[in-house]
Image: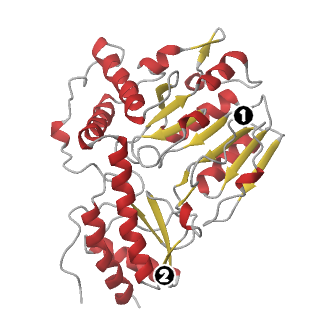
Amino acid sequence: MQPQVKPRNPNFSSGPCSKRPGYDVSQLDVSTLGRSHRSGLGKAALKRACEDTARLLGLPEGYRVGVVPASDTGAVEMAMWSLLGQRPVDVMQWESFGKGWLTDITKQLKLKDVTPLEADYGYLPDLTKVNFDHDVIFTWNGTTSGVKVPNGDWIADDRQGLTICDATSAVFAMELPWEKLDVVTFSWQKVLGGEGAHGMLILSPRAVERLESYTPAWPLPKIFRMTKDGKLIEGIFRGETINTPSMLCVADYLDALDWIDRIGGLSEAIRRSEANLDVLSTFVEQNDWIEFLAKEPGTVSNTSVCFTLDAEPDRVKAMVKLLDQEGVAYDIGAYRDAPPGLRIWCGATVETADIEALLPWLTWAYEQTA
């Protein structure tokens, strides 16, 4: 029978992700709108975005946080173009975004001493093969595969190279070993359900030292430049952005950070996401027609949760369409480059009750499309 209870919020997209519970755009502090982002008011809002991010994440002393152009992609590219070339590079990829970084390093930057460490969807590369005398680039959580690294134990404490981590669907949902990460990037529209177009760039003191001691052999576009006369442009990490940001998006991000504060901070955000995954894990255990795409239990993402089904691709598409038409679940089809299946966002802004309400509808849609 068709279920009667629908999720109160049917938004399960993996980006832009669901807004926080109780979100109301009319409640945003929009005092910065119509003002220059370089005004005292504008810079104060951007500075708070950087400072509150550092405080809520518990970043170590000396780590810097900046708002940069072009979402997480822009932040990763900024790091790669500014930092790579001094050492050989190990690039880990097990889904589409890691593959994109590998392509840019080999075909755009045209670096020669590059070691790809690759795995198919559902798997991680062999982490023991990473050479930490090299610079290392990896995604913490494969947004399109639902596969995450289980922890940071595999990262060497005595590394000589830099670790550059694309953590866009992990920050504010997973524990990150900050002392082992030299560059971390994320975007507002993922775990916090913010608006797109802006990236966050976190630099360790080791990354800053590289920026101030090494000059790449290639020209750098203006929006990638983080140094002037051999010194870090500290203003970038105090709210003086490289290009003009949307102050409405900044207000939206500050609202999300304030929500994290109100619910109890980072630990509660992580708990909420993990509770959502627990509900899905029980569902997978109880139904033999659905499985996690991730093959190892410790690598199953608790944000972008990806599934394969005992169904042909056309049937999966029909399920996704049916659930959309019923107003039950929006945007839950697998990423276009991933194996056919479902992808359900389970970050902190998604209520566990909505995940629970969704599950009978998944079974119904599977049966209806048989």
Question: Which is closer to the viewer, label 2 or label 1?
Answer: 1
Residue 314 numbered mark, or none: 2
| Mark 2 burial class by Cα count in 10 Å: few <14, some 14-19, many 20+ | few
Residue drawn at 47 percent across, 14 percent down: 235
| Mark 1 burial class by Cα count in 10 Å: few <14, some 14-19, many 20+ | few
Q: What is the three-letter code of the residue carrying label 2?
A: Asp
User: Residue 160's x, y, as percent?
Assistant: 75, 31
Q: For numbered disc 1, what is the local secondary structure?
A: loop
Q: For numbered disc 2, what is the local secondary structure?
A: helix
Residue 158 numbered mark, or none: 1
Q: Nearer the viewer, residue 54 or 250?
A: 54
Q: CA distance from mark 2 to mark 1?
A: 50 Å
User: Residue 301's x, y, as percent?
Assistant: 49, 59
Residue drawn at 22 percent across, 82 percent down: 3
Q: Earlier in the sequence, mark 2 or mark 1?
A: 1
Above or below 228: residue 148: below
User: Residue 188's x, y, as percent?
Assistant: 40, 40
* Residue furthest out toward the top: 229
Quarter of the image that includes the N terminus:
bottom left
Quick check: 158 left or right of 261? right
Q: What is the three-letter code of the residue carrying label 1?
A: Asp
* Residue furthest out toward the left: 26
